[in-house]
């Protein structure tokens, strides 16, 4: 047995060795536990310390060499960043493979860092991340179509969609706002520190983001994605004409997919019948080329019923999207008033030519004097509008030319043609098309309102109301202080009325 005095001395010596008997004061090592495990880390720490290396238990700003085993540089960087309360790795720190430490211990001192020791990283450290301020309303920001944080925004949007299925609008908008902020960042988020000073990121969104940064995925998002309810709601609301309410009712009755609507003999309205009939086509993204082909048809139709009309492709395609779920058109004529009665003629023409598989037209119910500045519920606008399903012939590869489908071959004089269910390899496909007719005086507001994105529109209205005391719709802008409508002939003028910098359509992808 070791005498008491001796034992005390040994303990003191060991302690000293850990701290004082540090032979290489310029080097502070931190060993990453990830993949290596706690016991191997403890063993290497003891061994290293016994050779005179200063090895820190926790990461701090004094660390100069981070060593790890079987990790990539990116993994180490992400792991360290997330286990150090946001103390970011800086470029002056060596990210090294364990071989550097074992070689150094064998040599009895730190060996020069060589390329083969270095872990390769593709990530930029936070010092390279420019400080960037993000305005809090989406309509104050430029949001490009392609951005750097898809892996985070897709996850947040799953939660937003799920909240919509549960008719929890507040929650859904909160997730959409968070996602939208990330879309506007000029860099990829790698660590929670990158989110400092950003607006709109609620506690829940931050928790989800943190989990994804640390573990690669979020349990909540994954379990939502896999849940039977979410999948059924997605499939059922994917049927044209089926909204969240009917889908939810269907799910509660045990319906899981569109074919269950038929199998169980659900009572379907005309839109829903068409939705089921053309389900596959309508859930296949519409390409830009197909949108342009439909534009040509609509232009020809409009010009033959009201020459001189102006036709604008709105919605996602105007924002530069390559694919969409439908094709949106806004139609007007410079001569105010002549657009009245245009829609029925247009629909007739299209139907006679065999382009319509389904259509439902709603009349223009907007009257400034009657509706006043109050916004209609759900911000539904009141234009004359045609929800339709087009029958589009195959697009040729090189141009937007279409093999048009003749009326004899389509037989689409009925609103829903029950006899022309598309076959695989068919020479045509069904495409959802929205046609909207606007009086010229409202055209700028309608263009702005129909270009989207939905969140951008929502934020424009919120900005108008909360920041400017104004009320914006797709028809008009009303200034409550001045108690008058503000007229505009272009989107630029509307932004100016609202005291906003003009954001072009391709940067409204919030
Ligand atoms: P969409 O639903 O067509 O979305 O609405 P999108 O941005 O074009 O995307 P995809 O590719 O089709 O999915 C287009 C715009 O029209 C407005 C929406 O607010 C959106 O900005 N809109 C839509 C209305 O103003 N009223 C409506 O009833 C429907
Ligand atoms: Mn659209």
Image (tube, rainbow, N blue to C red):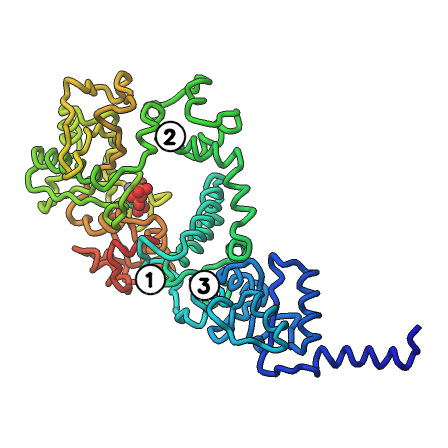
Among the 4 quarters of the image, the one containing residue 299: top left
x and y, in percent, of residue 146 in the image? 32, 54
The residue under the point 52% across, 34% down is 229
Label 1: how many Cα within 10 Å (few below 14, some 14–19, many 20+): many
Which is more N-terminal, label 1 or label 3? 3
Classify mark 3: residues with Cα within 10 Å, few (<14), some (14-19) or many (20+).
Answer: some
Q: Residue at x 46, y 65 (%)?
A: 194
Is the residue indicated by label 2 positioned so its CB lies within 8 Å of ligand 1? no
Name the element at disc 1. helix
Residue 51: give x, y in percent of width and height.
68, 76
C-alpha distance separating marks 1 and 2: 34 Å
Q: Which residue is mark 1?
A: 140
Placement of the N terminus among the 4 image quadrants: bottom right
Q: Is residue 381 among what the camera can see?
A: no
Specify few, some or many for label 2: CA neighbours under 10 Å numbering under 14, 14-19, or 20 or more: many
Q: Earlier in the sequence, mark 2 or mark 3?
A: 3
Give me the disc on residue 239: 2
Q: Is residue 338 left or right of residue 475?
A: left
Specify whether residue 141 is in view.
Answer: yes
| Residue 183 percent coordinates (x, y) | 38, 56
Nearer to us in this view, 100 or 454: 100
In the image: residue 483, left or right of residue 6: left
Ligand number 2: quarter of image: top left
Tell whether 373 sits left or right of 163.
left
Residue under pointer 3: 121
The quarter of the image holding the C terminus is bottom left
- Element class at badge 2: loop
Could you say where residue 149 lies in the image, as x and y percent from the top left? Answer: 41, 56
Instruction: Work out whether residue 18 or residue 99 is closer to the camera in this orientation and state it.
Output: 99
């Amino acid at each position: 047995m070791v005498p008491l005095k001796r034992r005390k001395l040994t303990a003191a010596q060991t302690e000293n060795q850990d701290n004082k008997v540090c032979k290489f004061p310029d080097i502070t090592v931190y060993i990453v536990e990830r993949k290596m495990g706690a016991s191997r880390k403890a063993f290497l720490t003891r061994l290293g310390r016994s050779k005179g290396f200063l090895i820190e238990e926790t990461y701090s700003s004094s660390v100069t060499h981070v060593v790890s085993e079987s990790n990539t540089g990116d993994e180490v960087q992400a792991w360290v960043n997330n286990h150090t309360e946001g103390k970011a790795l800086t470029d002056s720190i060596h990210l090294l493979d364990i071989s550097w430490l074992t070689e150094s211990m064998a040599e009895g001192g730190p060996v020069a860092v060589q390329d083969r020791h270095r872990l390769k990283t593709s990530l930029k450290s936070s010092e390279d991340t420019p400080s960037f301020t993000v305005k809090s309303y989406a309509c104050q920001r430029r949001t490009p179509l392609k951005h750097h944080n898809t892996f985070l925004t897709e996850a947040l949007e799953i939660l937003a969609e799920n909240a919509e299925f549960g008719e929890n609008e507040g929650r859904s908008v909160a997730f959409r706002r968070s996602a939208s902020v990330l879309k506007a960042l000029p860099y990829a988020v790698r660590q929670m520190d990158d989110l400092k000073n950003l607006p709109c990121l609620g506690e829940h969104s931050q928790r989800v983001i943190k989990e994804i940064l640390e573990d690669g995925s979020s349990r909540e998002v994954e379990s939502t994605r896999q849940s039977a309810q979410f999948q059924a709601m997605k499939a059922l609301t994917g049927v044209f004409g089926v909204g969240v309410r009917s889908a939810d009712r269907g799910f509660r009755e045990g319906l899981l997919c569109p074919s269950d609507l038929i199998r169980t003999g659900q009572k379907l309205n005309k839109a829903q019948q068409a939705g089921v009939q053309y389900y596959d086509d309508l859930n296949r993204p519409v390409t830009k080329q197909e949108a342009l082909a439909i534009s040509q048809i609509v232009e020809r139709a409009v010009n033959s019923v009201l020459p001189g009309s102006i036709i604008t492709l709105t919605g996602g395609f105007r924002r530069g999207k390559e694919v969409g779920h439908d094709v949106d058109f806004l139609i007007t004529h410079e001569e105010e008033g002549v657009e009245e009665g245009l829609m029925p003629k247009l629909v007739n023409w299209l139907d006679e030519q065999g382009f319509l598989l389904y259509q439902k037209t709603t009349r223009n119910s907007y009257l400034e004097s009657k509706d006043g500045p109050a916004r209609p519920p759900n911000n539904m606008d009141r234009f004359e509008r045609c929800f339709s399903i087009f029958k589009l012939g195959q697009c040729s590869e090189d141009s937007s030319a279409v093999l048009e489908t003749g009326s004899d071959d389509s037989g689409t004089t009925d609103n829903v043609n029950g006899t022309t269910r598309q076959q695989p390899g068919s020479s045509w496909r069904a495409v959802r098309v929205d046609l909207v007719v606007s009086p010229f005086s409202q055209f700028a507001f309608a263009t702005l309102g129909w270009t989207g994105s939905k969140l951008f529109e929502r934020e424009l209205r919120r900005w108008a109301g909360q920041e400017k005391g104004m009320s914006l719709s797709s028809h008009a802008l009303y200034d409550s202080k001045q108690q008058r409508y503000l007229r505009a002939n272009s989107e630029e003028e509307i932004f100016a009325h609202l005291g906003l910098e003009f954001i072009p359509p391709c940067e409204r992808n919030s």
